[in-house]
Image (cartoon, rainbow, N blue to C red):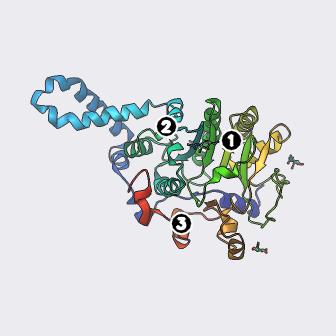
């Protein structure tokens, strides 16, 4: 049975949950691959690719036609290059100090990706960013503007069903997250995962003190003392903690891999159902609960990493902790447009005036 409180909690914790349907303004962020996709459909795009391959094959005999087809062939070649780009290659390309910063993005979230990237570029950490593209349009778009910084780990989730909050498609989509992270740990990298409805105001890396396995933030809105402990907090009303799956830093240790494996298990044991329209966060919390004895966990300071329920709702607290904020999470609100408006109201929607600072340029 799911109480109203539970439902609210889940909705609050779900960023960008009801991104569909997109507003007309958001739809105008569209770009070539999206238009192609919607125009021809997936089969159409495949046919188009096949045609380009054929043109490529016959090019040597094309003679005077060569100039006409040259750019199409180039495009096809670059598409196939990114389609075959592996996570191992991508991580090796972006990692600095054996560290990668990852997000998982599908096409409707590209404006948020851009906003997040501008804030990271301001802290000079953008070179480590790897965008896990959850659809081919995002893969091509990001790599065309910023070669090598996006990878797609097949199979791509079904774009039509992946975004509707509470749907099985959305659950499937978010369930890929611990697999991606485990994969990167197995490759031997430290990994910082962020949701893209976040903005960096300062450099988070100096907060990753010591040599713990897993670092995370609390998703609760209640104010804690500045010197709160860094252990896993006590369980809340539902018998589990409310740690956010939105920002996680992992070292490639046995302990961190254990937590990711447990997270995958928990998602499989409590699969999506019509009644319990779960997302991946409760499973993450159960994974922390069950591995707490064997793994070195570290709760990051609330003043530096507040939940959206605190930062956007308690001005007194924001004033009191001025200058201490490091990453702001635009959660405890649902809806694409509402999130953008809130970022704008707080001066955190950087894409309007600062898109030249983004490694993706103006989108
Ligand atoms: C790598 O880490 C060292 C110390 O751990 C730090 O001084 C240096 O700035 C880091 N380099 C990069 C490129 O992040
Ligand atoms: C979600 O994943 C399950 C299990 O892999 C699969 O049976 C189902 O078809 C998927 N649903 C959607 C909408 O992607
Ligand atoms: C794990 O959850 C159980 C059930 O809520 C709780 O009794 C226990 O204290 C939790 N363990 C940790 C380490 O948080
Ligand atoms: C807001 O923050 C202030 C200052 O930290 C705190 O005393 C107060 O309890 C908070 N209000 C709510 C509703 O949590």
- Checking the image for residue 250, the label placed there is 1
Return the disc, 3 or 2, that comes first in the chain's sequence. 2
Find residue 81 and report its image quarter.
top left
Residue drawn at x 50%, y 53% as measured from the top left: 121
Q: Quadrant of the N terminus?
A: bottom right
Q: Nearer the viewer, residue 335 or 61?
A: 61
What separation in Å lies between label 1 and label 3 (alpha carbons)?
27 Å
Viewed as shown, does residue 295 lie left or right of 35? Answer: right
Residue 245 seen in the figure: no
Would you say the residues marked 1 and 3 are in contact, meaning their CB atoms lie under 8 Å apart?
no
Quarter of the C terminus within the rendering: bottom left
The secondary structure type at the circle numbered 1 is strand
Chain-order first, disc 1 or disc 3: 1
Mark with earlier residue (2, 1): 2
Q: Which residue is mark 2?
A: 152
Residue located beneath label 3 in the image: 348
Q: Which x, y percent locates residue 20? A: 50, 57
The quarter of the picture showing ligand 4: bottom right
Image quadrant of residue 223?
A: bottom right
Looking at the image, is mark 3 or mark 2 nearer the viewer?
Answer: 3
Callout 2 secondary element: loop
Taking the spot 72% from the left edge, 60% from the top edge, the residue there is 9
Question: In the displayed structure, would residue 141 be above or below residue 316?
Answer: above
- Say whether mark 3 is within 8 Å of ligand 4: no
Q: Indicate left or right for 168 with 121 as reference.
A: right
- In the rendered image, residue 187, in percent from the top left (x then y), is placed at 61, 30
- The percent coordinates of residue 118 (x first, y second) are 49, 56
Neighbourhood count class around disc 2 (C-alpha, 10 Å): few under 14, some 14–19, many 20 upward:
many
């Amino acid at each position: 049975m799911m109480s109203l409180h539970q439902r609210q909690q889940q909705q609050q914790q779900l960023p960008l949950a009801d991104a569909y349907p997109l507003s007309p303004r958001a739809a105008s962020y569209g770009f070539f691959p999206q238009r192609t996709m919607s125009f021809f459909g997936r089969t159409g795009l495949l046919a188009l690719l096949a045609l380009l391959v054929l043109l490529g094959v016959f090019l040597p005999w094309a003679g005077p036609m060569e100039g006409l087809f040259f750019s199409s062939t180039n495009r096809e070649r670059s598409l196939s290059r990114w389609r075959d780009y592996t996570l191992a290659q991508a991580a090796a390309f972006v990692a600095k100090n054996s560290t990668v910063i990852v997000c998982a993005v599908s096409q409707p979230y590209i404006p948020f990706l851009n906003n997040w990237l501008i804030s990271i570029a301001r802290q000079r950490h953008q070179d480590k960013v790897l965008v896990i593209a959850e659809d081919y349009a995002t893969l091509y778009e990001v790599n065309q503007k910023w070669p090598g910084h996006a990878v797609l780990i097949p199979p791509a989730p079904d774009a039509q069903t992946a975004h509707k909050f509470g749907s099985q498609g959305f659950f499937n989509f978010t369930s890929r997250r611990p697999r991606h992270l485990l994969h990167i740990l197995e490759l031997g990298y430290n990994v910082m995962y962020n949701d893209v409805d976040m903005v960096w105001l300062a450099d988070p890396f100096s907060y990753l003190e010591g040599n713990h396995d897993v670092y995370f933030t609390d998703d609760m809105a209640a104010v804690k003392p500045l010197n709160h402990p860094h252990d896993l907090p006590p369980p809340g009303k539902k018998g589990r903690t409310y740690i956010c799956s939105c920002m996680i830093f992992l070292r490639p240790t046995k302990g961190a891999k254990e937590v990711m494996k447990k997270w995958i298990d928990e998602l499989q044991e409590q699969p999506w159902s019509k009644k319990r329209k779960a997302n991946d966060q409760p499973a993450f919390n159960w994974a922390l609960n069950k591995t707490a004895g064997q793994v070195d966990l570290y709760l990051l300071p609330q003043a530096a990493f507040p939940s959206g329920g605190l930062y956007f709702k308690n001005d007194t607290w924001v004033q009191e902790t001025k200058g201490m904020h490091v990453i702001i999470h635009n959660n405890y609100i649902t809806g694409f447009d509402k999130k953008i408006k809130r970022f704008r109201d707080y001066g955190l929607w950087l894409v309007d005036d600062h898109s030249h600072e983004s490694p993706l340029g103006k989108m």
